[in-house]
Image (cartoon, rainbow, N blue to C red):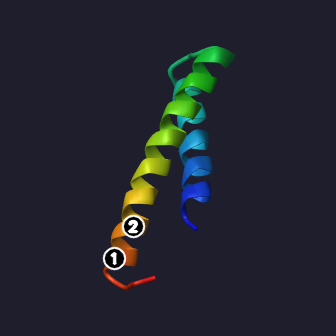
Amino acid sequence: MFVIPAFIIGAALGWYRAGKLGGNRLDKLQYAFAHGIAFFLVALVLTLIADWQGLL
């Protein structure tokens, strides 16, 4: 439920950070993908914990 928006937010943050560091398009894509996956995994773990606790 929350993992897709987390991936998109992470990708946007990675794209922004790479641009701020002066990266080219491939650098931005790499940063976006890496941040997107990291945010996706964190959101997935938090969703599983919330489900186990009966919060969702």
Q: Which residue is mark 1?
A: 52
Q: Is 19 rendered above or below residue 11?
A: above
Residue 48 is tagged as 2
| Label placed on residue 6 | none
> Relative to 45, does residue 26 appear above or below in the rendering?
above
Q: Is residue 55 above or below residue 48?
A: below
In whole angstroms, how far apart are the C-alphas of marks 1 and 2? 6 Å
Residue 44, given in percent of the width and then of the height, sits at 45, 58
Q: Amino acid at mark 2?
A: Leu
**Residue 47 at x, y percent in the picture:** 43, 67
Pointer 2 local density, CA inside 10 Å: few below 14, some 14–19, many at least 20: some
Residue situated furthest front in the rendering: 52
Q: Residue at x 54, y 41 (%)?
A: 36
Q: Residue at x 53, y 27 (%)?
A: 31
Nearest the viewer among 45 and 13 is 45
Q: Position of residue 38 (x, y in %)?
A: 44, 42
Q: Which quadrant is the N terminus positioned in?
A: bottom right
Q: Residue at x 64, y 16 (%)?
A: 26
